[in-house]
Amino acid sequence: MALTVLSRGVLIAPFCLALSRFVCYAKESEQQAESAVRIGVIGAGIGGSSCSFYLRQLFGKDAELDVYEAGEIGGRLATVSIGGHVYESGATVIHPKNMYMQRFVRDLGLKHKDRPTTGKKMGFYNGEEFVFIESQWSVVTLAKMFWKYGFDLLKLRKAVGVLIENFSRIYDVHDNGIAYTSVEGILNAMGGREYVNLTKVSLAEVLKEHGYADEFVADMVSIAARVNYGQQTNMSAFAGEVSLAGVQGGLWSVHGGNKQVCSRLLEKSKATLYKSTVSGIKLAKGDKPGYYLIIAEPPDKNGNISAHVAGKYDIIVIATPLHHGKTDLKFKSFPKEITNFPDPFHRTVATYVDGELNFRAFGFDSKEDCPTEILTTRDNKFGINSVAHNYPVDYQKGKTETQKPVWKVFSREPLTDNQLGTLFTSRKETKVVDWLAYPHYDPPDTLSSFELHAGLYYINSVEWAASAMEMVAVGGRNTALLAYNKYHGLNDKIDAKWKPKTEL
């Protein structure tokens, strides 16, 4: 009997020990789950997706990360189908020195889209005549440009090069874990107080101060402002200089569509995606520092929408524009009112036409003589900023099935049938993308903060300096770093002065 009891004791002891360990592990796991940071991201464009990617890298696998998106993943990185092919309809080109976009494409297994090397010809149109037409030989084109615009070309090229070099400082800053609470901090890290001041004066003022000829500004600079931002040289100087970088060579886009970057970044972030419209953010009372409730409006099975609390979070990142005309998101129970930003977004209309351009309307006797990329220097009778060949997102050299271009027309307002009838002799199919694409840059622009309240962040503040895929990606990583540093009390990594490394 004693042996039996002893045997039972030997069997029961390991079982109790295992049970004890299991209970302790369960409690520890529960505590970890309760202490795991809960993050909600509103918006799945390049800002929201890049920020989610970096948040996962920083906070690790235990963080609970939710992303809310009412529309398509990619936001303003979008596509349109016409003529049996798919074309970029949102943010289109990327500069070769945009390191975040370059890294994303490399690390996500994507690749650059091929660019056509023949059949393209550019012309500058002032509303009455062409003031410049590109030659089929690049040497002749450069000679013609230099003859017309002189040393202003070289001076501008150097100035844009300095801008890009200084912009690149932010990559080292972020790689060292430093984040800024304001857009002004980012600009200071790039180029000091001078870059902040560039947001407070017009591009025309800065160019005049540096002695650029009126003709050069009226032609080359106006084209960059009109094509890239749909605006004039009276726009803020910093955004204007960014637009000038957008007319340099080597520009590229992602094969298959730029929006793939967003979807793949979200996959890497392992976030839970909710297809919902967020109507409000509520600060819970009685908690220090408190937590947030997201009020979302997912449709039910019948398509009806009713608001409900979707979840509570320690950190919320807003990655969609809050400015007038872009959102109706409301902030509730905050000690200080947070109102939507009043500054307007700029309306841009892109009209895609599968048809034949009316070359005679531009004064040409043959199709071959007419440029395939017409860039306007001022307002004109056609009501356009530009009209150019646009190639499919899957374009590849040597593959005829992916080589069909359509015409893409930029304008400030929708074109009438009469205007389209003047521009084109025939139209098989026409599609219009009418959207609020980027801020309207009226200096002095106000540079706001990335932090709206403790634990509540706003990526798109960065767009009031300049709007571009890379600029928003910079805002995305900065916001992720700021949220991480604030959450963990890493104050030495917030708004730190940055001195770029120099070689001895």
Image (tube, helix red, strand yellow):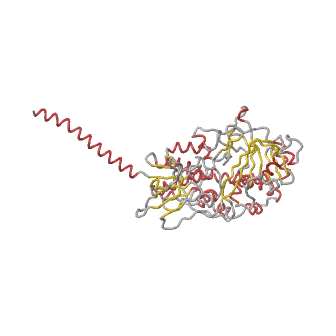
Image side of residue 116 versus residue 367, left or right:
left
User: In which quadrant of the rendered view does residue 134 lie?
Assistant: top right
Q: Is residue 399 above or below residue 195?
A: above
Task: Count the marks.
Answer: 0
Q: At 64% from the left edge and 39% from the top edge, which residue is drawn? A: 256
Q: Is residue 107 above or below residue 346?
A: above
Q: Is residue 209 above or below residue 100?
A: below
Residue 35 is situated, as x and y percent measured from the top left of the image, at: 39, 52
Q: At 76% from the left edge and 38% from the top edge, which residue is drawn? A: 117
Image side of residue 406 versus residue 73, left or right:
right
Farthest residue in the left direction? Answer: 1
User: In which quadrant of the rendered view does residue 438 lie?
Assistant: bottom right
Instruction: Name the quadrant of the N terminus.
Output: top left
Residue 259 is situated, as x and y percent measured from the top left of the image, at: 61, 44
Front residue (pair 407, 289): 407
Front residue (pair 204, 79): 79
Farthest residue in the right direction? Answer: 365
Farthest residue in the bottom direction? Answer: 336
Residue 263 is situated, as x and y percent measured from the top left of the image, at: 57, 43
Residue 279 is situated, as x and y percent measured from the top left of the image, at: 53, 57
